[in-house]
Amino acid sequence: MLGFLIRRIIQAIIVMLAVALIAFMMFRFMGDPVSSMVPEHATEQERAEVRERLGLDQPLFVQYGRFVARAATGDFGLSWRNARPVSTLLAERFPATAELVLVAAALSLVVGIPLGIYTALRPNSFNAQMLQFLSLVGISLPTFVTGILLILVFSVWLGWLPSFGRGEVVDIGWWSTGFITASGLKALILPSIMLCLFQLTLIMRLVRAEMMEVLRTDYIKFARARGLRDRAINFRHALRNTLIPVITIFGLQLGGLIAFAIITETVFQWPGMGALFIQAVNFGDVPVMAAYLVLVSFIFVVINTSVDLLYASIDPRLRVDDAGPAGGGH
Amino acid sequence: MHHRLLTTTAAVALGLFASTATAETLRFGASADIYGFDPHGVTSSYDNIFVHNIYEPLVRYSPQLDIEPALATHWEIIEPTRIRYFLREGVTFHDGETFDAEDVAVSLMRAVHPNSPLRGNLPGLVDVEIVDDLTVDLIMSGPSPLLNNFLTNIFIMDAGWMRENNAVEPIDANQGEEGFTTSNANGTGPFMVESRRPDSQTVLVVHSDWWDEPQHNLTRIEHRPISSAATRVAALLSGEIDLIQPAPLQDAARVEAAPGVRMLENPGLRTIMMGFNLTDTLNDGNVEENPLQDIRVRRAIKHAIDMDLIQERIMRGKSRNTAALIAPEVPGFAPELNERLPHDPDLARELLAEAGYPDGFAFNVNCTNDNYVNDEGICQALAAMLARVGLEPRLVAEPRQLHFERAQAGQTDMFMLGWATLPMLDGFSVLSAMLHSPEGSYGTWNPGQYSNPRVDELTQAIAVELDDEARIAMMVEAFGIAKEDLAWLPLHQQPLAWAAREGVEIYQSADDLARLWTVRINR
């Protein structure tokens, strides 16, 4: 177990270094960030001075090396856009993204799994067919279109829900939460629906396919022959086995939720890390972009590691195989 | 009984109070958040105008863009390089401190500090001498006819407050320390900061001790950035926002059709133009020489372009076509500079044949696709019109950072540029940056290397001429030469597009800056 974690930590570091390197190589194609920082009538000398102060006159690998050296001490530098520490900026925005992704992920599970079970158990009913059709729409419609449609219907036409922002938030320590105010909860509804729609339909279709597969297996037929009740067969035996691949996919998709949050945050002006990243791209704010990409790659590694650990605890066979070398208490 | 009477009176009184002193809140939806409150922190004119609600300059622009006294009541030229400003008495900062000459000296020197990103906006300031508590002398390196124009953008902070908070030197993005002034503010302006949550909301409340008579009837401003244009319009339509800037031009019809909201559209200061590569070779050509050096070819290009069609189809009729490099509001403009060559494709073909290119030639045309109103659409139309007279333009539309880097490095043959002459708001801005041959601080935006000795000579004379009439005459002459030379190809002044709820009144200044301290809300 410990060995596994250490291996993963080393992998995480390598992934983050690689992501930062690729990011730095891409920044060169993004244009000159200095043009956003000087007045339009600035002379070439003024531009050169700014470039020098920011270290942009140095070769790429020197810039990269400096970034890594500082990042290793936890210092991501100052944003070029407003001279605030990048770590502060990210910490300020993290709660917004985390809450949004959390709600979207919960929604996709809480709604997706029951719908999947329902369509698997009654594949020929009208409702199930309808859900299948709608899920196709959910998978194929670009998320920003759904977002704009939601705004049009629920904000402009009906006037029920806010079209942008997080509503009123309350600070608990450094964490700003929208969970405990009415306007904060209302503001969460549309963005989380937009964000979860793809995941939800994916999970629903996955659960349905897996469940139908499992229901055809011998041990289910045998259980039925033994006269077990439907409820016990479906939920205790079939569903459990269905969920193993679902967890893997869900884990991978959780990273996707954070990545997709960029679009949702832009459409709904959700003040999260994705919105911060988009601004940084528009401005050419290299420190913010680099730190964001490294942070996201870190989150990806953490999620994948947790999924692997979770996987072992759900599937006993994996645990037995791993028990010897990991030195567990069996 | 008595008790009930009392509550009724109280309710009536309350009602009366509410109707006389109504609390008006302006919810302003901008396309981006401000970077921070530091008035010398960034050069963006958008930030500058928002911070103008909080901090004030010595002299300011009225919404109609006339210079009027603000923290200085009047001024006089003692010597060409020594200008005396007499400061307003009885002005207080938001924290109660009194405004005086020391604040002016420390603030101006902070703005021109070598590390200040703003120092290019106040060129030539050498020192500020304090004469007495309410008088300062600005010492300039040479005669500065545009000093007042520049000063409209330099805000005054409280010297004591800066010292207390270790903020006398400007914020340096490379220092590794967050500046106090980014998140805190203490100005003399009509509004003070109540709270700020980056990218969500910045709240200003009225400063009741403001020295000036307020034109607004606001008690509170909520600045709420919404970067997605579609969401911004939706927020206006759903009544969550009172004023948006900018409103996307393609949604204008929808906004006008909706009840209770209206578009605000006027031609602005920003002139959109195409620059020519006038060096010896084309960057992306199929001929040895550079045909663009031939004035007949440039004239052919002008005749080939149908600006009326672009105005009608791409700009919804809201742009103002122009032959001048500056808008009519800008000093240096004269009606004769604005006589356009007619659209005449046959003449264009003739001119090309005459110049020796009956079959045209290839060159690249570079545009932004995210910076000006419908910039990409304009360029596609231009390329199609040029192709119709036999030329082979290769269109490249890119995000602004890439475009400007390429254009400024002289890697394009025809490139798009929009120039509003801000912050100096004077024709000299165009002459010094775009028409003077590139040398030193001149010609910083003349990558095509247009060069005319007479224009250079005039520009240098204008730089130090303190007599307004003589200056303007020289500017008109220089612009006339550049027009004859077809140095640039001016297209139009792009429209300003804002949208507001009915009852929200604001004068739409031509510089596209929303002066929120002039907003009135009527119900």
Image (spheres, rainbow, N blue to C red):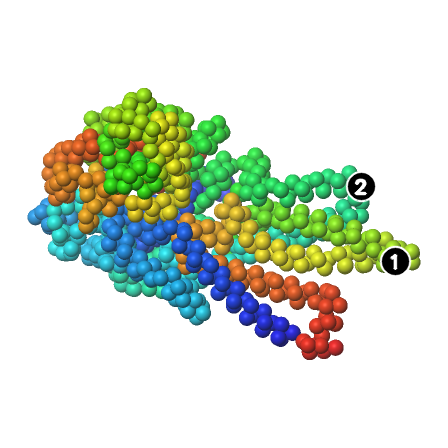
Residue at (31, 57) in percent of width and height: A51
Type of amino acid at the residue the image marks with label 2: Asn
Question: Residue B169 or B172: which is nearer the viewer?
Answer: B172
Residue B187 vs residue A166: left or right? left
Q: Earlier in the sequence, mark 1 or mark 2?
A: 2
Vertical position of residue A165 compared to residue B384: above or below:
below
Question: Residue tagged by mark 2?
Answer: A124
Q: Please, what secondary structure does the residue beneath circle 1 have?
A: helix
Q: Nearer the viewer, residue A22 or B153?
A: A22
Q: Position of residue B30 (x, y in %)?
A: 41, 43
**Chain holding disc 2:** A
Q: Residue A79 in the image: state x and y as whole percent.
A: 39, 58
For the C terminus of chain B, the image quarter is top left
Q: Quadrant of the N terminus of chain B?
A: top right
Residue type, mark 1 in image: Ala
Quarter location, residue B348: top left
Judge whether B154 appears above or below A68 on screen: above
Q: State whether residue A221 is above or below residue B10.
A: below
Residue appearing at x 40%, y 33% in the figure: B380
Location of mark 1 (residue): A223
Q: Nearer the viewer, residue B181 or A82?
A: A82
Q: Is residue B195 visible?
A: no
Count of marks, rendered view: 2
Q: Nearer the viewer, residue B368 or A295?
A: B368
Where residue A226 sits, quadrant-wise, is bottom right
In the rendered structure, the answer to whether residue A51 lies left or right of residue B135 reads right
Q: CA distance from mark 1 to mark 2?
A: 23 Å
